[in-house]
Image (spheres, coloured by chain):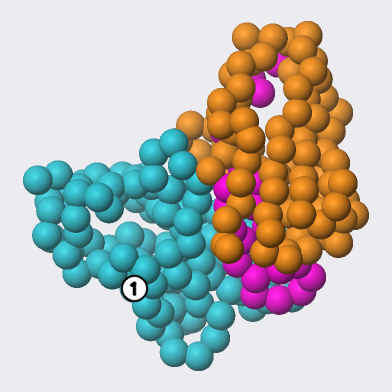
Amino acid sequence: AQSVTQLDSQVPVFEEAPVELRCNYSSSVSVYLFWYVQYPNQGLQLLLKYLSGSTLVKGINGFEAEFNKSQTSFHLRKPSVHISDTAEYFCAVTPNSGYSTLTFGKGTMLLVSP
Amino acid sequence: DTEVTQTPKHLVMGMTNKKSLKCEQHMGHRAMYWYKQKAKKPPELMFVYSYEKLSINESVPSRFSPECPNSSLLNLHLHALQPEDSALYLCASSQGGAGPYEQYFGPGTRLTVT
């Protein structure tokens, strides 16, 4: 079984500041990792994914994440946030074999203020 | 076309009503999912269809009845719901089978049970 921990339920930040949203996972098998974003009253949109290869993954909207196997982490970063980045961010994992089911973290609300 | 569509967008129903939620994708995906999401929580997996066969039922009450008429369509039939079933219902699809397939989510149906 897999589990995902997003330690920060809410991260307030000022516009144009950098941000890091933390994600740690636990799994007895190899996994693939994802970050999804959910804007208010919308579905989930894939930001980026790590499958294999380079541990630094770039996604949409200027976001990137780094996979750290020794620390079982997959933190999301953006060097300069915009008001429009205000949303809920979910980290998710799936086993790299078998059915493609996702285990989600509890989510982190990113609040960007002017 | 990377879109998953869901209808209706909003639904209000009484506890004695029967209604259905619909989901459609034209990406050739062979796995489709229903999730339930309560406010400020991550999505909870309800059902998975793989190649039009129900492959996962996460112990969902029988008042929720899924149906997959063909590879592009997924329905969720609702009957005798309870107020605690009020939530955002999300549909998703993926290529299916084993592999690192990200899930594409629809915008959801906001369900209110009165």
Chain ID of residue with mark 1: A
Q: Position of residue A106 (x, y in %)?
A: 48, 47
Who is closer to the viewer here, A107 or B62? B62
Instruction: Examine the rendered structure and indicate whether residue A57 appears above or below residue B8.
Output: below
Q: Residue at x 69, y 59 (%)?
A: B26
Q: Residue at x 79, y 18 (%)?
A: B18
Q: Specify whether residue A21 is in view.
A: yes
Q: Quadrant of the N terminus of chain B?
A: bottom right
Q: Residue at x 14, y 44 (%)?
A: A113
Mark 1 — residue? A64
Instruction: Identify which amino acid the numbered label 1 is placed on.
Output: Glu
Q: Which residues are magenta?
A: B82-106
Q: Is B109 covered by the magenta stretch?
A: no
Left or right of B105 on screen, residue B67: right
Instruction: Examine the rendered structure and indicate whether residue B111 appears above or below residue B54.
Output: above
Q: Quadrant of the C terminus of chain B?
A: top right
Who is closer to the viewer here, B37 or A5? B37
Who is closer to the viewer here, A69 or B75? B75
Q: Position of residue A40 (x, y in %)?
A: 39, 39
Q: Residue at x 57, y 39 (%)?
A: B108
Colour applied to chain A: cyan
Colour applied to chain B: orange
Q: Secondary structure at mark 1?
A: strand
Instruction: Examine the rendered structure and indicate whether residue B18 appears above or below residue B104.
Output: above
Left or right of B91 on screen, residue A47: left
For residue A71, what is the image quadrant? bottom left
Q: Is B101 covered by the magenta stretch?
A: yes
For residue B100, what is the image quadrant? bottom right
Left or right of B70 on screen, residue A61: left
Q: Position of residue A15 (x, y in %)?
A: 13, 53
